Image: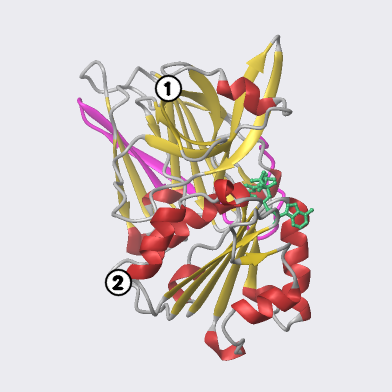
Amino acid sequence: ALNIQGTTANVERLSFDFFQNEQTVTLCIYTSKTNFLTYQDIIILLNKATTFISFIYIDDIIHTIMVELFEPVTTDFNIRIATEKGRIEIELKKVQHKIWKMIGNFTDKHLSYCNIKNFDPLYFSVTLMERQQITHDTYWLKFSLQNGIHMHPPIGYHIRLKLNKNDVSLVKPYTIIGPLEGKLRRDEKVIDLLVKYYSDGNFTPLLKTLEIGEQAEMSVFEGNFDVYRLETCKILILIAAGTGFSPMMRIINNSFGETKQNLKNVVLLFFNKTQNDILFRKELTSLSQKNKNKFIYHNILSRPDSTWTGETGYVRGELLKRLLPKHDKKDQTLICICGPLAFTKLAATDLRAIGYSDDEMHQFLA
Ligand code: NAD
């Protein structure tokens, strides 16, 4: 069930309107988010021909639009956003070309809202398209979205993957990844995830048996990363451990585009057990060679073998102080931290101890 009751004070409900002709019906959603509304703020689920569900993410509130349409529409729709007005138009195509005498019925969830923290996410089916091996235990999985589903999670957001075994559902969150370099396509209906298989786990051994072409369930996205901070910070510090590198992938991609004037330095401190565990080492090394004065990249191993001459050990204040640029409050620093919970907490504590404030950090804790 969805969380229907708005619990947050002073949240403005969206308003809703529609118009139609014989071929199409257009749903208009009016928000107060002017200038910043993007395609990534909107999820549309039209997986049954007459049930229209949309979630609109505005700040930390998720608004629901839910209409039982009068007659079936196709899964092929157009979204238009009038950014400066905060207006969204979704043009649906009627299966039978005629004027409807009404739009349909509004469900009781229609125009409700919920804080993202309390959101009970909706799941839908996705298909495993591709599984590419990255290291000895970590794979890049590509899931395709069905027609009728529009979902482009913003940088740093995660979904939950659900698998069923003997009537029991197992769920695990994964942050959406993307290539480290190159332009991202907006029209792709693919969700990319980085998965480490743990032989002693419950979830990942089951995920390992999922074959190409088989289905899993995926939730709508969640998260609390303020993507706008990537546009304003001057020093970006990424502190990642193991697959905690996942959110950093799209952050790195975003950091080296042509229009990135704001960023002076990107520093990646990547903590892993052994050399074999380092994800995308070749790509990251090449990226740091291409961006010599801008991208600083260090690997730190907690279980190095005798051939390793680089940094070793766990995250700690002494290491951070030595590897990070000199801290200056005026620099607008953003530090992103992601890894095992104990790692993330320890890194944040160490950073505070050497003078960084919580405002300068984002901890990924999915
Ligand atoms: P891992 O066991 O390979 O460890 C990687 C490094 O983490 C180690 O080399 C060490 O430096 C550090 N580390 C591990 N345990 C530590 C501890 N107790 N104290 C201090 N440092 C420690 O890591 P993994 O198996 O790849 O796990 C990655 C973790 O990241 C998972 O727990 C996963 O849930 C989490 N993760 C979170 C998000 C998110 O919140 N958005 C996204 C991706 C991954």
Give the extent of the magenta segment.
Answer: 1-29
Q: Position of residue 88 (x, y in %)?
A: 36, 48
Q: Is residue 214 magenta?
A: no
Q: Is residue 37 visible?
A: no
Q: Earlier in the sequence, mark 1 or mark 2?
A: 1
Reply above or below: 173 against 156: above
Instruction: Please name the residue shown 61% across and 56% down the image.
Output: 224
| In contact (CB < 8 Å): disc 1 and disc 2 | no
Q: Is residue 174 visible?
A: yes
Instruction: Please name the residue shown 39% across and 42% down the image.
Output: 17
Q: Determine which of the numbered discs, if any, sits on residue 309 in the image.
A: none
Report if the beta carbon of the residue with label 2 is closer than 8 angstroms to ligand 1.
no
**Quarter of the figure with residue 182:** bottom left
Q: Determine which of the numbered discs, if any, sits on residue 259 in the image.
A: 2
Q: Is residue 318 left or right of residue 243?
A: right
Q: Determine which of the numbered discs, if any, sits on residue 47 in the image.
A: 1
Q: Nearer the viewer, residue 297 or 74?
A: 297
